[in-house]
Amino acid sequence: MSLLRGGCWCGAVRFRVPDEFLYAWNCHCSRCRASTGSAFKSLAGIERDKLKITEGGDALLVVGDDVLNDTRCGSCGCFLFSVVRDGAYVHVGMGSLVDPPSIRVSAHIFVGSKAPWFEITDDLPQFEEYAS
């Protein structure tokens, strides 16, 4: 099992996660767009207990509660991951990974609420809501 390094832009927060992601999607929902300030969030899902904060646990900014939140660096504001699915999983922002994961994005989800100014131009499957 390979461990991947991740962290924020300023270096205050660092984490490790095994390269065992269960899925990877581009999410176009309004919440993901707002949390990233972009057209979509590229995310990789894994069980919450597999992600370990290695530096800067006291620097985390958690927006939400323990079972549904966006977790950021409190210093630079960088998005790191979301806690989802009743607190059991995390959606790691793929852009916060330092090391490349073996998984690749396999679909676009929540395209029913995608930004009207953004055009999806790849051949990945598209789902109105969750991938089936």
Image (cartoon, rainbow, N blue to C red):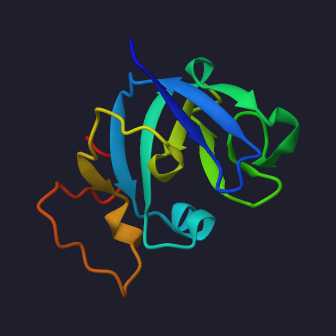
Residue under the point 63% across and 55% down: 79
Residue 63 or 18: which is nearer the viewer? Answer: 18
Q: Nearer the viewer, residue 17 or 109?
A: 17
Q: Is residue 122 left or right of residue 16?
A: left
Q: Position of residue 48 (x, y in %)?
A: 59, 24
- Most extreme residue toward the front, as rendered? 11
Looking at the image, residue 117 lies above or below residue 94: below
Give the quarter of the figure containing the C terminus. Answer: top left
Residue 74 spot, x, y in % from top left: 82, 53
Q: Position of residue 105 (x, y in %)?
A: 28, 47
Image quadrant of residue 85? top right
Instruction: Check the image and report above or below for 23 versus 34.
Output: above
Given residues 23 and 96, the one toward you in this image is 96
- Residue 16 in percent (x, y) is at 58, 27
Quadrant for the N terminus, please.
Answer: top left
For image coordinates 56% across by 39% down, the residue present is 6
Q: Is residue 73 left or right of residue 49?
A: right
Q: Which of the 4 image quarters holds residue 2?
A: top left
Q: Nearer the viewer, residue 113 or 18?
A: 18
Q: Is residue 122 left or right of residue 131?
A: left
Q: Residue at x 82, y 56 (%)?
A: 75
Q: Is residue 11 above or below residue 56?
A: below
Count of numbered marks: 0
In the rendered image, the residue lying farthest to the right is 58
- Residue lying at the far bottom of the rendered structure: 117
Residue 59 found in image quarter: top right
Q: Residue lying furthest left in this view?
A: 123
The residue drawn where x is 16% and y is 56% is: 124
